[in-house]
Amino acid sequence: MRLASWITAVNVLVASGFSIAGLVRPQSILPLGSVPTVASLIFALYAAARTVPLAVMALIAIYRRSIPMLLVLGALAGVIQLLDATIGVYQHDWGKSAGPFTVAAFQFYALFELRKSASTTV
């Protein structure tokens, strides 16, 4: 439970941090030379609308030590990281791909271990 909790917490907090950074200082996440626009603000709002509630619910699951809730929310966070990584591949930006792929791999490994340990204790 501890490994899955830590990895999930880091995953959702980092994702939320990037979306909040897009709201507060959009030039920090835009490609070099890009100018923040109303469209980039709206995109950041959409990103925050999906990541902040996920982070809150995942942290509640961790606090409550709810294995079923953590499995579902951790899997969702891992899938989101995989999708973020594919966006990096699409942009041919390996820096935006390697990090999310790595986080997703750790996330799914931790969930696998949590599920395995949960099934042996039942």
Image (cartoon, rainbow, N blue to C red):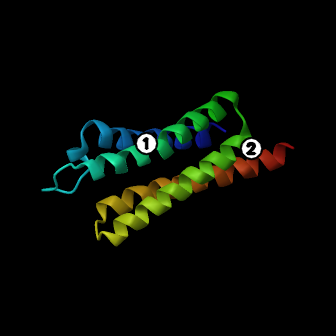
- Quarter of the image that includes the C terminus: top right
- Give the camera-side residue of 20 and 106: 20
Mark 2, Cα crowd under 10 Å, few <14 / some 14-19 / many 20+, is: few
In this view, 92 is above or below 106: below
Q: Residue 112: x, y in percent?
A: 67, 55
Kindly identify the amino acid type of the residue bearing the numbered disc 2. Answer: Pro
Kindly identify the amino acid type of the residue bearing the numbered disc 1. Answer: Ala
Q: Residue at position x 30%, y 69% from top?
A: 91
- Quarter of the image that includes the N terminus: top right
Q: Name the residue under label 1.
A: 48
Q: Residue 4: x, y in percent?
A: 61, 43
Q: Residue at position x 70%, y 32% from top?
A: 65
Badge 2 vs badge 1, beta-carbon distance below 8 Å: no
Q: On the picture, is 67 further left or further right than 81?
A: right
- Give the camera-side residue of 108 and 47: 47
Q: Residue at position x 38%, y 65% from top?
A: 87
Closer to the observer: label 2 or label 1? 1
In this view, 3 is above or below 82: above
Q: Residue at position x 75%, y 47% from top?
A: 117
The furthest residue to the front = 38
Q: Residue 81: x, y in percent?
A: 48, 56
Element marked by disc 1: helix
Mark 1, Cα crowd under 10 Å, few <14 / some 14-19 / many 20+, is: many
Q: Name the residue under label 2.
A: 68
Q: On the picture, is 74 further left or further right than 98?
A: right
Q: Residue 45: x, y in percent?
A: 39, 44
